[in-house]
Image: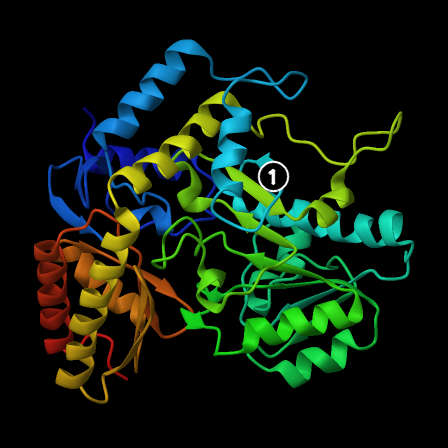
Amino acid sequence: MPTSTELLALADRVLVRNYRQQPIILARGRGAEVWDVENKRYIDLTAGIAVCGLGHAHSTFTARMTEQMQRLIHVSNLYYNDQLMPAARAITEKCFAAKVFFCNSGAEANEAALKLARRYQSQVVGAPQRTTFVSTLGSFHGRSFATVSITGQPKYREGFGPMVEPVEFVEFGNLAAAQAVLEKRTACAMIVEPIQAEGGIVVAPPGYLAGLRKLCDETGTLLIFDEVQTGVGRTGRWFAHQYDNVVPDVMTLAKGLGGGIPIGAVACSEKAAQGLAAAPGGAVPHASTFGGNPLACAAASAVFEIIENEALIERVMQAGEYLGKRLSELVTKFPGHVVDQRGRGLLRGLSVSGAPAAVVARARELGLLVSVAGDKVIRFAPPFVVERGQLDEAVAILGKVFGEGVGKA
């Protein structure tokens, strides 16, 4: 087995240096813990950025994936496969959606949703002039050209212009701002995250999502909820918008949907699904070679089944409330340093007055993996199976970090 020093040197030679990986090389995991190639243990409160909800090396999930790999991995969308429809049904049984399109990532899901919205207005409604996408400041929707164009953080767009247009950005949580744009009736869709995750774990204020639903209904605009990071149980509901009892036209999913296997999905109403439906004899309007492949779909079905069978939604609620309480204790203990805690379920943020990246780095040295969201926020997105003792250990590590003055302005 190569050493970490050897592997890091190899990384410098063979990898495009677009990422800024932390200087550890992970080799194995179990539950909410991972070990690097030097066999150092870490508490993993990132879960692959809200991906590994079932934790690492979950025995039932691993067995299901092994079984599927021994049967069939890929056949393309020239044919159906026996895992495709059950995976779509698993999604529709838990939400508003009637139809599902599968792809491979969150960016691809959002890209497909944008194409759906444009084509819906043009081909179904007969309003080809409705081409504007409305998004929110502070949002994050992906790294492809279209999805970075609708991401409301300029830093992600630097050096890649010109962007896909037209796009209008409005303040997150501000219904009056949304109304002013939507009443022009030039928008094909508005896309919004129920919780701005990469923007700093910012929860939509009460009434905001319902107000957007009303505005979109009044103006003939499709409403898209980006649940790539918040969906599939992460917040203590199957989908975060269910807290507000609001139904979108389209919902995008990825991250936690596959338990670590890459998969994305666009879940939509019967009406909205017409935006991607092929006309008789016409060209296929959108496709994905790997989308809906048997392995990924088996993974999605397994994730839903395991969450249900192991009552993990309830566990997320309980663990999330406990984590929120413990993080609030840090706010009280370190005033002027730790500013506040926020979020829902097991998607939590802890804002600091200084540099959160410094906190992340020091916590890693002490055996805790967390990440940054936004400019001042430390993100917690642990596996749903995280144990209370692991959360206590994580908070104790953070207490030591803050006690050293790390992350204080």
Q: Secondary structure at mark 1?
A: strand
Q: Which residue is mark 1?
A: 100
What residue occupies the far top of the structure in this picture? Answer: 71
Quarter of the image holding residue 170? bottom right
Left-right relation of 74 to 235: right
Q: How many marks?
A: 1
The quadrant the N terminus occupies is top left
Residue neighbourhood size for the residue with mark 1, other residues' Cα within 10 Å, grouped as few (<14), some (14–19), many (≥20): many
Image quarter in which the C terminus is found: bottom left
Up the image or down, 89 lies above or below 119; here it is above
What residue sits 14% from the left and 59% below the top? 391
Measured from the top left, where is residue 356 in percent x and y?
30, 70
User: Quick check: 226 above or below 171?
Assistant: above
Residue 383 x, y percent position in the rendering: 26, 48
Question: Please, which colouring scheme is shown?
Answer: rainbow
At horizontal 49% and vertical 32% (from top left) the residue drawn is: 87
Q: Position of residue 178 (x, y in %)?
A: 68, 78
Q: Residue at x 44, y 66 (%)?
A: 243
Horizontal side, residue 392 vs residue 195: left or right: left
Name above or below for residue 21 compared with residue 343. above
Query: Could you tell whether 153 is left or right of 31 in the image?
Result: right
Residue appearing at x 26%, y 54% in the figure: 314
Amino acid type, label 1: Val
Asked if one can make out residue 137 in the rendered structure from this viewpoint, the answer is no
Q: Residue furthest bottom?
A: 336
Residue 161 seen from this side: yes
Q: Which is more toward the observer, 127 or 92? A: 92
- Picture coordinates of residue 191, whole percent (x, y): 63, 62
| The one of 367 and 310 positioned closer to us in this rendering | 310
